[in-house]
Amino acid sequence: MVQSRGRFKCDQDRIRQLNMASPAVQSGKIPLPAGWKLLIWLTVFIVIIRLAFILAMGPMPQDAYYDFYAQHLALSYYDHPPVIAYLLRIFTMVFGKRVFALKLADSMVTWMSVLAFYNLSRQFLSLHKARYGMVLLLSTFMISILSLVSTPDVPLILSWTIALIFLHGAIFKSQKIYWVWAGVMTGVCFDSKYTAVFLIVGVFLFLLLSNKYRRFLFSRWFLIYLLCFALTILPVVIWNIRNGFASFKFQSEGRMNSMEGFQIDFSDFGGVIGHQSAILMPILFFSFFYFLYRIIRKYKLQISRIPDDQLFLLSFFVPVFLGFFCLSFFYWVKINWMMPAYVSGIIWLCRYWNKKWIRMQLIFSLILHLAVAAEVIFYIIPVRSDDTWFGWEDLARQVKEFRIAYPHAFIFSADDYKTSAILNFYLPEMVYAKNVVGERALQFDFIGTDLLRLSGHDAIFIDSNPRFTDLRSESDAIPPFYYKYFDKISPLHPILIKKGRNVERKFSVFLCTNYHPPPAFSTHSFAFIIWKQVPFLKKK
């Protein structure tokens, strides 16, 4: 046994001497492990496809809607906080109001998120495993979505990741000043999207469960962290106070009221499994369940026995991941709601993954990205929804022709926000939304629109028909109550969006004569907003 140990030690010394003598080590370059070149090339190819999307894709309605935010700067907004608006405003000021500027903003901030993710992963993983994490993150379709579609999730993921870096430094490295920066970045995260409350939940949960670091829960530095957070979110709070807490109510009461008595719906749950496995790739998505099961089986209810580094990562992953999955039995969980969970979740998972699984993940990812590239370029499968990039610029061009024919009419659309937002992006005039006909219109209700000014004017009504069955302007689709706001509504020839000879999209067009504004919408005063938001005022 002693001889074998001695021989083993000699072999180790010889290997060390050979490695030190190698040109790579002498030049200061550490060679990549075998098989890494293939992984790197697959990753680079996926990244190149994403870059091509920036030039090939038209605008998504979300791009135009948040650019509408950017053109009406405020402390906050009805359905989301303001950081995405400030981000897009900066890029459109520099590069002009064009689709490329919006996509560039998304891509640059997302790449900053990737770099921040790598920095965070190095706090928990070896260089080798951190590279796994980088490749895993870049392989997800989540990064493609963040790179190409303007949503509050773009700045959310960046600020979430940076906040975790500062929290790790404050807790594990006792860098006290990091509590201040962690509070500020948590606030910026909240100013991006309200999902940031899960950051505070995660901090509290980790400190509560960790025997070693529980002392921070009752320290002045944790209070300083909360104070810095509170100061940073003041713009959002002030906007809500001024506007009857409209945004907070929309994100809380509004969504709770739409759950229809907590009826269990397994189809929504299945839908969440489908879209989350699509944005992560199936092997990565289902790995989360498998390794969560393993860690539960290992530690059972003795959560404090989980190593602190793993417990930290899980505290910011599990509440979001499992929380929204539980919610999906009662409510439709959107594709982007769980994205912040995957920042720490992927880092936690990397300690269990090997090169074989990474290769399978990349192959799945490459296939999906090639399929999406073919769809974006050739529009093989028509999207029967307004959530598409196809045809918007052509729509704006044809609407301009109607504007020439009816120069004194204002333009509006009533299909939620999408058509109105797109036309506002392309046209040099205000395009109105469904507040024209007395319905709530998200941020369009909060930009100071005085509809009394439009009284007596004619209007061009653009109505999207994503699931059209014929090529006429569909008068039957107009709700009957629309007619009380105009003397007459007459169909005009529809706008048809073609690809080659095939009609892919249709917009019905109507001339609406002599507009009568709804009484509640005849002012843009604070009293109107209170009327909209406070129930007891509406009963009078």
Image: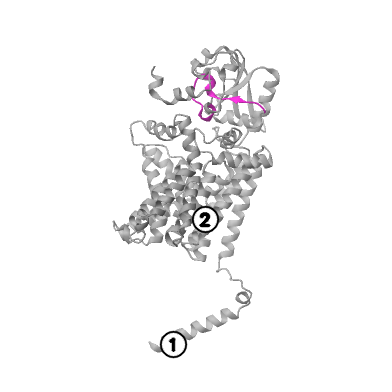
Q: Which residues are magenta?
A: 428-444
Q: Amino acid at mark 1?
A: Gly
Q: Amino acid at mark 2?
A: Phe
Q: Residue furthest bottom?
A: 3
Q: Mark 1 = which residue? A: 6
Q: CA distance from mark 2 to mark 1?
A: 43 Å
Is residue 442 covered in magenta?
yes
> In the picture, which quadrant includes the N terminus?
bottom left
- Residue at 36% over, 30% down: 260
On the image, the x and y values in percent for residue 292 come to 37, 55
Picture coordinates of residue 276, whole percent (x, y)? 46, 46
Q: Which residue is mark 2?
A: 117
User: In the current view of this chain or complex, which residue is farthest to the front?
Assistant: 220
Q: Earlier in the sequence, mark 2 or mark 1?
A: 1
Is residue 123 positioned above or below 60 on the image?
below
Q: Residues within 10 Å of mark 2 (few under 14, many from 20)?
A: many
- Residue 283 visible: no
Residue 375 highlighted magenta (yes or no): no
